Amino acid sequence: MSTSVKHREFVSEPMGEKEVETIAGIGPTYGEKLRDKGFDKAYVVFGQFLLLKKDEELFVEWLKETAGITKNHATSCYNCLNEWAQQYI
Amino acid sequence: MESSSLAGGVLHSLSARKCHSALDAARTLLRHGEAVNAEYNGTTPLHIAAQNDNLEMAQMLLHFGADPTLLDKFGRTSLDVATGKTKEFLLRMLALPQKKRKGILYRIFICHTRSLFSGLMKKARKNIRRITSATHLRPTSISDPPLPKDRHDPHPPTMIFEDDPLPLEKFVLPGTPLTSRTPPVPSSDCVTTKRGGRPRARVIPASATNQISAKRVRAHSVDDNLLEMNKALSHKASKSSRTPRQVQTPNNNHQVQKVHFKTPRTTKPQGGLTWTPSRNVNTTPRALKLPTPKAKPSAPPMEPVNVSSDAYFTADDSILDELEARIRQIKINDPAAARITKLTDHQLRAQLAIAGISAGPITPETRKGYEKKLILSHGHTTVNSKYSGPLQFALDGKPSEDGDKLDHILRRELDDGARQFNYILLDPRAVDDKEVTLDSFIAAIFYVGKGTGERPLSHLIDAKVAREAKTRPGEKKKIHSDKIERINLIWSSGVGVIQLEIGKGVGDRLALTREGCMMLAIGSNNLTNKRGGEFHGAARTWDNRKRAIYGTYLILRAHKVFNADRPQQIMPRNVPDQLFGAAKKK
């Protein structure tokens, strides 16, 4: 499975203060929804990702519940964060 | 009322019958003033309905104010003669205070009606439409002759324009000359109908929409809506000191009969759970989608609707909340799910641990997900069993037959190389018989891996290094893991590790998937593997049960291979000091 440009860009560097929309699979609409729930930065979502112990099932489920993100998008979001985690922590 | 003379005993005969037409007819009679508690042959309609376990009828009679405490000629109440469900219902109703009863009765109808709307019962709906349209076309002998205008009206100030179409203030009656009058109330509260045109419901006050929309299901003409809305309006009005019945539809006699009552037996009780009585949801758009009435009413109005009208005013919020709670109760109809939601965070964590799920912090945010996961995990990990469900089944001699199919799917999809294989490390102490049983074979497995070339050896080399490091205390321990400890433990007891290579010549992703599936089947508690598996291709979307089925299939195959060709035990002396070439990939 090839990864998107967004995915590669996100994974290629520390996330720093990046916005939540920079995560692969999260566009402006989902970004807004997450922002409304208080997940404004990529690292906040990453925090939730860690809180769920990098569990794909749970994380995808959580994204679905929180922001109504489709399974496909949520999975690419998960892959993005997972790969980032593998590289940097 | 005058029409009771027309229908002496008719209501009684209807009460015994369980069908739509009987209900419709009875409703029409009651609407037109038939005395609900009328005595005929020394018994009341409610007695008859109760005796015949005609729950729908009984509910409707109660709704119209039937008195369950009345005695028949033998001195029995309706409850005394009631049977079956009706008896249960009556018992429950009588336990409640009078005011609550009416509110609940009313809401039962809404529930039934609403659940009809919410799916699954298209057929039933069609059926009802058929029935109702039939009643539209059926000329009713009772209502045919227009009643004299000077007849006694029990509610002269409030029931305005019941029969006289002329002084219309708010509504234009189908079939009457159009009188152009300015509505005295805001147009948002009013509904207009055009002659021959499609009736349209306009904006309905939010407080009313809930009650109304629920009825829409069986409301096949806008006049029904009018009536309901009027009731709701007057409900609202009663608070804002407007005269109840200020708004009254003149043409409600015929369609109205469909409004009130929804026969419960056409619906399933759990169907009602989609309905949450939130009072502020504006469901008006739904109202616009109403089917247009098939036929115009065959008769002008004849009798004011005044029966049990206070049912609409007794309902207070507590009943709504009560109902909401009940619906929520039904929603969690799965006992296991209900039990899990009741657990404390601590208990939930313990339960998750039993299910082999290592949970992160349980916060309000994460809890839902964990609950779900636990519920799902019950599907494939029987609590307190050592292995996953499918493997347990295989041990019991009932292996799933899907494994072959799953293997076929994955092989075809993940066909991207032929260098990888999977391997299993076994503790030989458990498997030294000639013919190893599946049970002991699985018990002996302590590591599942995948790799190329000499990868499996690397664990043994690591173990050897660690072993030698122990003898030289000065050197710091480089590698420490359960797996290496286990290998060393085996070596210490004088036997060698058994390494079984299976499924050779596959691609990277297939090997990874197989590794993950086998780990799932055996359960990470029983292995020294540290990391969970990865799943690729179709296996990504499989649930854990399916993965475990596949893993079980692979383990069964490995077991056969093992018995057919027993691999050598590997002792420390067989292991080279280090791995050469590109095989070591760490």
Image: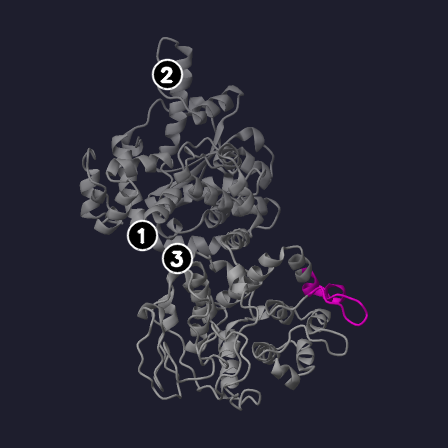
Q: Is residue B177 left or right of residue B71?
A: left
Q: Is residue B296 or residue B461 the one in the foreground?
A: B296
Q: Determine if marks 3 and 2 fall on one subunit.
A: yes
Work out how far the residue at label 3 is from the one at label 1, CA to CA, in angstroms: 34 Å
* Quarter of the image that includes the C terminus of chain B: top left
Q: Which mark is residue B280?
A: 3
Work out how far the residue at label 3 is from the one at label 2, CA to CA, in angstroms: 67 Å
Label 2 sits on what residue type?
Lys
Dot 3 falls on a residue whose secondary structure is: loop
Q: Is residue B247 left or right of residue B7?
A: left
Where is residue B298 shown, x and y percent of the image? 48, 89
Mark 2 Cα-neighbour bin, 10 Å: few <14, some 14–19, many ≥20: some
In the image, residue B183 lies in the stretch drawn in magenta: no
Report the magenta residues as a range: B68-88
Residue at which label 2 appears: B477
Mark 1 Cα-neighbour bin, 10 Å: few <14, some 14–19, many ≥20: few
